[in-house]
Amino acid sequence: MNEKQRLMLGIAVIGFVILVLASFMGNLTPYKSVSEVVAAGKMENVQVNGTIVPGSTVYYSENNTRIFELTDGKAKMKVVFTGALTNYQEGIPAVVRGSYKNGAFYAEEVLLKCPSKYQTIEEEGE
Amino acid sequence: MDPGYFLLILSLLSSAYATYAFYSGVKSRRKHLLARAESTVYIYTALLTLAYILLTYYFLARDFGLLYVYSYSDRHLSTLYTISAVWAGREGSLLLWALYLAVINSAILRFEKKDAVTAFSLSISSFVVLFFNILLLTLSNPFKRLEFTPPDGIGLNPLLRTPEMALHPPTIFLGYAATTIPFALVISAVYFKEGWLKRARFWILFSWLFLSIGIFLGAWWAYKTLGWGGYWAWDPVENASLLPWLTVSALIHGIMVEERRKGLGAWNYFLAIISFGLVILATFITRSGIISSVHAFGENPEGWMYLLLIVLSTAVGLVLYNSRKELFRDSLDLSFNRETTIFANIMLLLLSTFTILLGTLAPLLGEDVQITRQYYDRIEIPLGTALVILLGICAAINWRSDRDTFLKSSRVAVAGGVIAFIAVFATTKLIVASLGAAIFAFSLLTHIQNLKISDTRNPRKFGGYITHIGIIILFLGVMGSWIYEESYKNVALELNQPKNVGGYTLLYRDNQMVDEHDKLVVTAVVEVYRGDELVGVCKPHLKVYKLNRQDRVVSSVEILSKPTHDIYIAASGFSEDLKKVFIELYVVPLISFVWVGSVVMMAGGTYAVFSKMSITGINIAGEDREGREIGIDVSKDGKTSGRKSRKKKGKKK
């Protein structure tokens, strides 16, 4: 490698790093905890993580809607979700994305942990 | 104590002894020690095999007194899925990992030249067996017994009951285990100031192939099973397996340059070490939980063990590099030639690795943060596109710099690209799609132009080109399916009432409820029309497994595959009287290119690995770079028998 090549490579790398950092910072979204959301009373378009409270789920088959409670160990909130939810299970960690208003969280998306890891969680819980 | 645990203790002792005896035998040149080390490799391989068979037996015998069997199977589980349940959890898959590496070590002993480099590298890879053995005895013991025997098990997660998911772990773990060998060889060879490329090449390609198959099976499973219309979500678990694939891909190309030009020696050295480190990281992420925060390490003591192994292997690599600096005087010729484009490709692969790693480890940066998919899309799509363009240029360029030949030979391909752009733009009016098609046509044409029938006799070139063509096809599929997918969620269909969704008319015609052996299946019969024409009949269904676990309800996907797109329907629920079904509809363009491209890619890889370069082929083809042989032959018999078997295999071809 000669001087010129090194210089060009260096510039390219620096430019790329800037690009990466910019989109990294731009897309780093913090999770909110259930307590924070409940305390705020109203929050739009947030991601909340917590654990699904065992025995809290009610499923309405007429409109494919599921209502369950999410907790962070301190506070609980009701989550309303309509749509497909494969592998749903109570007592496992979940991330819900949506808005909190009028005392309930209206989720557009519910993310559950990957299936191969359920057992680990159960064991740890024991 | 369970007999299985006892077997693991014995294999722990023998792998520890092999680690010591190989190392010390090479250092002190004591032949009897090396001979004993050799037999110990076979012994721990046999012990781990027995342990594995015993665990499988417990599964088949429905011995629910064993916690692991209880956790991953139940009485209704079919025999084949019961066998696959052995690797469904962390403990069993770590046992498989260790067993794979043990078998590979035995294979090396059987086929490789028995000299100091081999002996020392076996010491290293026996140490890795030892490492997993420690985990199996402490934190991931598959033979842990309950104090009582429950009448039935919890059952295998219903989502894992598909052939793809049954085969995904054993292929990807084989890829992981094989990555240990280039690492062990590179450390050992550099220590003895020997060449390592010819010995490691087979294992590099081998691990690449099985990583590819494993990743492909995982993606295919996600698409067919998870019901969100996609196959790659940049999930940490997916990223974990992609990272070593990227660095191993870079390593394959790096050694090509080093063999031809003696360049990139240091790059290859570190690529082999980094690949191993990433494999260990991947084992941690896939089997011990997502790194959701720094606490992942605290909660899971196993995390520290993995971290320790990564730090240890990197440190050894760095220290050795420092003391052997004179071996790495690279002469990289970065003029306009193939070497430069290959180097640029390696850089792109490394940039992808670095950025994906950054995203995957982002949660370590602070409390409860997560990186969104946009981050990956914004970085990896341009990198992937650049890579495919470079592939096209690379095929048209010579090892010697020759601008004129390049311009001449790429003329057709450039014309093809322009025609593809115009054609696609005229029909779809989509700029990105047209650009994608142009890049696809350009890169594909340069490859086809430079491929001759006679190249089938050159497995490295032919296999490589086929693999590249697969990647180029895959590129088009990824572009279509990621950028132009349409999704319609929460569509409620009433019985016998047609509904228009996304240019299609859906008609919920009928429903069925069938009681199968282990589950209840509720099926909706949905007719899909385009205008008045019937496109096909879809039968999305819900499976309710007869299990005492809440995730027993699985919504199953039905796909109408057309060459240009898939119509993908997932049922998410029924009303109680079954008169209403809730579905999600996805129209996924060019998805068939993803699968065809992947299969072509794996076919190319298979050709490169198995056509000519069997393990023995490497030995026949090449002595070391320096042509020297340190030659601590364990015994005369060992050596001659090794040679004989090499010759035999050689003749077969």
Image: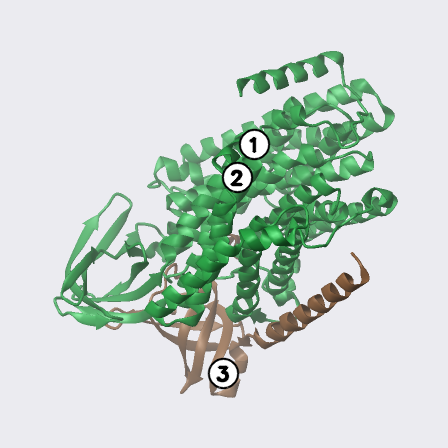
Kindly indicate the quadrant of the structure image that contains residue B344: bottom right
Q: Which residue is mark 1?
A: B4
Is residue B522 at least partly visible in the picture? yes
Picture coordinates of residue B473 (x, y %)?
Answer: 44, 53
Discs 3 and 2 share one subunit: no
Mark 2: few, some, or many residues within 10 Å (few <14, many ≥20)? many
Which residue lies at the image location 43% right of the left edge and 45% below the top edge?
B599
Q: Which residue is mark 2?
A: B463
Q: In this view of the protein, which residue sits in the foreground, A15 or A93?
A: A15
Picture coordinates of residue B292 (x, y %)?
Answer: 58, 64
Q: Which residue is mark 3?
A: A38
Q: Could you say whether the residue bearing mark 2 is in a helix, strand or loop? A: helix
The colour of chain B is: green
Q: Is residue B522 left or right of residue B361?
A: left
Coloration mode: by chain
Which residue lies at the image location 58% right of the left edge and 34% below the top edge?
B99
Chain designation of label 3: A
Tell me: residue B219, above or below residue B579.
above
Spatial CA span between label 1 and label 3 = 50 Å
The answer to whether marks 1 and 2 mark residues whose Cβ atoms lie closer than 8 Å is no
Q: Could you say whether the residue bearing mark 3 is in a helix, strand or loop? A: helix
